[in-house]
Structures are given as structure tokens and as C-alpha cells.
Image: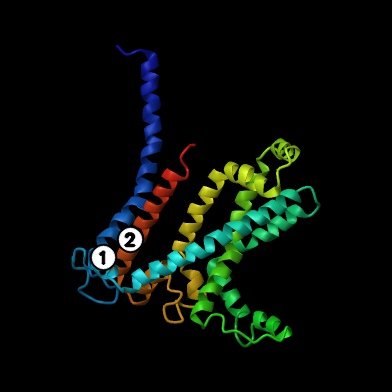
Amino acid sequence: MSSPRSAQSKEQRMVSRSFLYPLLVFLFMVTTFPGLYSFWISLTDMQIRTSGSGRFIGLSNYLEILSPGSLFLNSLGKTALFVVIALPLQFILGYAVAKIFALAGHLRGTAFLRTVYLLPVMITPLSVGLFWSYLLNPLLGLVNYILSIFHLPPQTWLATPGQALAALIGIYLWQWTPFVAMLVLAGLLGISKEIYESSEVDGAHWWNRVLQIDLPLLKKVLSVAVILSVVQIIQTFDLVLATTNGGPGTSTMVSGFAVYRDAFKYFQTGKGAAESIVIMALTVILSQIFAKYVLKED
């Protein structure tokens, strides 16, 4: 005969499961099932506008997109270049801004300035792209007007391959550097002032405080910010759509826009699904490597 305590424990487990199972079903429907379905589509020749498509073709889509010289491999290279250039600049600028806000925290109006500085993050990338495409317009844009004031020649910012990628990186930094700055600021405000005071007594220079205090204590915050920023760059397509449309040529054809182009512009759904699966796999692998070797406990 079971005791009242064991009966009560069994009843509690049943109640807990009654709440857990619907959640598991929901998570399966919104995460696992779409992923598995996308993988299945990637193994077919599905095209939205072509009747009779959707035949199983195995790994043909993967062999096509990963073949040497393919547009998708080129887009991965562009994305890697984007990450290599944008990420260090984003974190250097973000740390500098966060440090300024941390030091000026006692001044009136600092909280308001933080809010204003964070506004670009709250705007959709598509709106940001449209906004900057007007500012960088070679004929009517504000940027070229400012250059003319200093008697400098106008630039075709979004129509020249090198300048287009640089402009895209600059727009990304304008929108997403505040995100990193606020994360770093939260970490800086959590560092005890006594640590800085002790370093000042020891005569440590500012760069010693950065290298020996800030960076070690902000390691976890910076690591999370790196992962989120890399994922954001990899998924970028709406910013490209609103500014360069992947051009001129393929100079700004990043991986996220390549998926959009094949899946929704040329309606090659199977090919686009294969590209998205490759991007997802690379993102997971990079995140796991980063978490294993950077986020591990010292």
C-alpha cells in the first residue's frame, strides 16, 4: 500500500508532466519540425513556380552549392570577410562607448543619451537600409553634400564594389555597435570600483586596466556578444536588399542574401533550403567551438 507522501509525489509528477508535454509539442512544431522539413526540401528539386517539382534528388543541391566557384561559396567568403572586418571594429567601438558611459554615469542626461544611442537597434534592418540608401545617394544624399562642403568629389558609395561592401559594414556598425556597447556597459557597471582604485594605487596605466581588469572580467559578456554578432551577420539579408541588392555584381552577396535570392527571387526552394542548412550547420559548429575553447572555465 502506497504512503500518502508517495501518492502526493506521483500526483505532482503527473501535474508537472501535464504542463511539460504541451510545451515540448509546441517546441517541436516551431523548431524541430521546420528544421527537419527544410532538410527534406533540400534533398529535392522543389521549385515554387514549377509543377511536378519536389522529386528526391539526394545531395545534388549540396554538391551544386558547394562546388568550386559557386555563387554560394563566394557568398560565404563575403560573409567571412564581413565578419573579419566588422567584428573587431564593432567591439572596439562598443567598448569605447561603454567605457565613456560608465565613466560619465554620474552626469545628468547620461541615461537619456544611452536610450538615444540604443535607438538604431530598435529599427528594422530594412528601414535602416532604406534610410542609409537615401543618405548615400550619389546625387541627393547628405553624405556627398557634406563632402562637397569640404570641396571633396562625390562618391558612388553603393555602386562601386569596394565602397559598397565598406558602406554596408559601416551601416551595420551604426546599427549594431550600440547593442555591444550596452552589453559591455552592463558588465562594466558590475565590476567593483575597489578593483580600479587598487590598480590606481599600484600605478597601473589605463591600458593595463583594460587588459588586466576589464577584458578578463568581461570575458563571458564579450563571448556572448561575439556569438550573437556573428549570427546576426550571417543572417543579414534585409539590409543588403534595401541598399545594394547584392551588387554591384556579387560584391555584397553575403550568405543570407544568397539564400533569399535563390529561394524567393528565383524560386529554387530546394537549393535555398540546402544553403540554409549549410549556414545553420556552420553557425552551430562555430558556436560550439567558440563555447568550448573560449567560454570554458579557466
Disc 1 to disc 2, how far (Cα)?
Answer: 8 Å
Q: How many badges with numbers are in the image?
A: 2
Would you name the residue on which mark 1 appears? Answer: 62
The spot of residue 136 in percent (x, y) is 60, 79
- Which of the two labelled residues, at mark 1 and mark 2, occupies the earlier sequence position? 1
CB within 8 Å, label 1 to label 2? yes
- Residue 18 in the image: above or below residue 292: above
| Residue at figure coordinates x 37%, y 61% from the top left | 279
| Disc 2: CA contacts within 10 A as few (<14), some (14-19) or many (>=20) | some
- Could you tell me residue 149's position as x and y percent? 73, 84
Image mark for residue 103: none
Query: What secondary structure is found at the residue carrying circle 2?
Result: helix
Side of 112 where 222 appears, left or right = left
Per the image, the residue denoted by label 2 is: 278
Q: Is any part of residue 122 visible from this angle? A: no
Between 116 and 87, the residue placed more toward the observer is: 87
Q: Nearer the viewer, residue 230 or 118?
A: 230
Tag 1, which secondary structure?
A: helix
Look at 36% across and 17% down and name the residue there: 6
Image position, residue 37 (x, y; %): 29, 58
Q: Quadrant of residue 114?
A: bottom right
Residue 69 relative to residue 149: left or right = left
The quadrant of the rendering that contains the N terminus is top left
Please state the horizontal and vertical placement of residue 35, each as a whole percent of the image: 32, 55
Residue at 42%, 73% (x, y): give it: 253
